[in-house]
Image: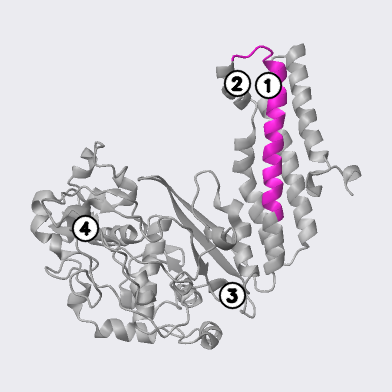
């Protein structure tokens, strides 16, 4: 699926590459993760067809001259049709045909293919909804399959190892993108976006058309194998993270769809070198450094400072952010995506976009770091204000009731929900060239005023008596005191309290 001038439509792979710089603006999956999976598939084709700069010195010219994707088009035109057949009997695209003898007896409805529909992978849970026979279109099933390869969660597959390929086929590993934030640099067109994210290399690797026909070593399922090495980016971006087989059926309109699926454990990869994770944003330093992962407790905008740090600290490693900083002009957006899960249960997709302009790396980093710190301080101050109100409103509380009673006056949820928009306004102002100090001043004032309003609304539930008035007064006074403390960010202090 692609977006062209506001419309979403389906196009063949050849059409996508032929028109990547004409009218195709972006990819459009049904979820952020599905869109990323489609983009990964296109990157794999680019690497396999040598549609990437061979050396770092060529990358900037490759991007600025808008190098066409003629090699990708030619590679696809020269490929045998059988290699791209989703329902080929012995080498189905992206699948493991070794599951074919077991599909009719052990397969389930195609809902299992869709990450958001699976629910908890735990095999002891009730999964009757996965037996539902409602078919998927071939296109929808293909996109869902790519998403499983990239983002599939750990757990126990709904497949019998004893009755099929072996005991370890039930052991689902986390997909290669399932535990980290994936960052994609977005350009004006799909072609621009592809070029921005294609790393320069001559070691491009093997495209994974199918499980059973490949020069790469494939695992067995008798025992858990060691992770295999990746032979290049084409291999990585098309890796078969699940053993999947799609069972064809005829849809009411006469087209071929998918009515039955089997999903089991797929490939296991060895440790990846930095050159294969060009977009990774690291938190921590030294031995404690690890890729930034999705969190149900923290929105992505609260981690924007780590993203801008990756661009600003480009002396550390040569990667996507190092290359972006060499662009002569123009604004690029950094799109961050992650899958939030509770162990084996998918919860939601995290997705956010952050502006970037070459030459403003340090300003953006400072603005994001300070903006996040201000937001954290406001949240802590609202927590203290809620406690102040609670102490007066409930003079003889039961310990078991304390948490809920304080929550009555705690405006932090409203604060966090309302801060994302001012934070993005802050970044937009900085990237457009406005003064960082003035932009932060406006941002801090907005947060302080909003926090006071949110607290006042929480306090409106207090009774109109002496105790209620006292609780209200103490809470508002506490919030004002916190904002004027010496340790408070200057942007929250009243003007007479500033240094």
* Residue at 38 percent of width and 79 percent of height: 47
Q: Answer with mark 4 or mark 3, whichever residue precedes in sequence.
A: 4
Left or right of 356, for residue 233: left
Instruction: State the image quarter where residue 132 is shown.
Output: top left
Instruction: Tell me the quarter of the image containing the N terminus.
Output: bottom left
Q: Answer with mark 2 or mark 1, whichever residue precedes in sequence.
A: 1
Identify the residue under disc 4: 223
Q: CA–CA distance between discs 1 and 3?
A: 50 Å
Mark 2 and 3 residues: CB-CB less than 8 Å, in contact? no
Q: CA–CA distance between discs 4 and 3?
A: 41 Å
**Residue 132 against residue 267 in the figure, above or below:** above
Residue 206's spot in the image, x, y percent?
Answer: 31, 78
Does residue 79 appear in the picture of this structure?
Answer: yes
- Which circle marks residue 322 in the picture? 3
At mark 4, the secondary structure is loop
Residue range (magenta) = 370-398
Q: CA–CA distance between discs 2 and 3?
A: 50 Å
Residue 279's spot in the image, x, y percent?
Answer: 50, 68
- Which circle marks residue 402 in the picture? 2
Q: Answer with mark 1 or mark 4, whichever residue precedes in sequence.
A: 4
């Amino acid at each position: 699926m692609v977006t062209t001038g506001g419309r979403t439509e389906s196009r063949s792979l050849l059409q996508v590459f032929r028109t990547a710089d004409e009218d195709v603006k972006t990819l459009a999956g049904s979820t952020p993760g599905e869109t990323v999976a489609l983009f990964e598939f296109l990157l794999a084709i680019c690497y396999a067809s040598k549609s990437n700069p061979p050396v770092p010195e060529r990358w900037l010219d490759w991007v600025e001259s808008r190098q066409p994707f003629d090699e990708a088009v030619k590679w696809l035109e020269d490929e045998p049709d059988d290699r791209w057949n989703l329902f080929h009997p012995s080498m189905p695209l992206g699948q493991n045909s070794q599951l074919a003898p077991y599909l009719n007896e052990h397969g389930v409805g195609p809902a299992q293919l869709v990450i958001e529909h699976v629910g908890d992978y735990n095999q002891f849970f009730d999964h009757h909804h996965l037996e539902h026979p409602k078919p998927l279109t071939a296109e929808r099933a293909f996109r869902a399959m790519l998403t499983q390869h990239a983002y599939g969660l750990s757990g126990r597959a709904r497949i019998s190892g004893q009755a099929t390929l072996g005991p370890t086929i039930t052991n689902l590993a986390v997909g290669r993108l399932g535990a980290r934030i994936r960052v994609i640099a977005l350009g004006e067109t799909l072609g621009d976006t592809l070029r921005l994210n294609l790393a320069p290399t001559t070691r491009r690797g093997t495209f994974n058309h199918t499980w059973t026909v490949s020069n790469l070593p494939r695992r067995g399922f008798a025992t858990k194998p060691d992770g295999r090495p990746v032979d290049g980016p084409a291999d990585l971006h098309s890796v078969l993270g699940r053993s999947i087989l799609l069972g064809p059926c005829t849809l009411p309109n006469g087209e071929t769809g998918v009515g039955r699926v089997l999903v089991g454990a797929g490939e296991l990869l060895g440790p990846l070198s930095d050159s294969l994770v060009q977009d990774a944003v690291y938190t921590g330093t030294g031995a404690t450094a690890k890729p930034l992962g999705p969190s149900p407790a923290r929105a992505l905008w609260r981690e924007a400072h780590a993203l801008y740090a990756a661009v600003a600290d480009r002396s550390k490693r040569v990667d996507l952010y190092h290359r972006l900083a060499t662009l002569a002009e123009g604004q690029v957006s950094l799109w961050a995506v992650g899958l939030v899960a509770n162990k084996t249960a998918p919860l939601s997709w995290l997705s956010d976009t952050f502006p970037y302009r070459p030459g403003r790396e340090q300003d953006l980093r400072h603005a994001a770091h300070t903006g996040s710190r201000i937001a954290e301080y406001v949240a802590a101050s609202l927590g203290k204000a809620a406690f102040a109100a609670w102490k007066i409103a409930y003079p003889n509380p039961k310990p078991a009731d304390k948490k809920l009673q304080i929550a009555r006056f705690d405006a932090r949820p409203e604060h966090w929900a309302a801060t994302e928009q001012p934070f993005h306004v802050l970044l937009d102002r900085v990237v457009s060239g406005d003064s960082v100090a003035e932009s932060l001043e406006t941002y801090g004032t907005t947060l302080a005023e909003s926090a006071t309003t949110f607290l006042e609304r929480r306090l409106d539930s207090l009774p109109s008596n002496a105790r209620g008035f006292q609780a209200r007064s103490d809470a508002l006074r506490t919030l004002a005191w916190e904002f004027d403390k010496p340790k408070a960010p200057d942007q929250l202090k009243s003007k007479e309290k500033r240094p």
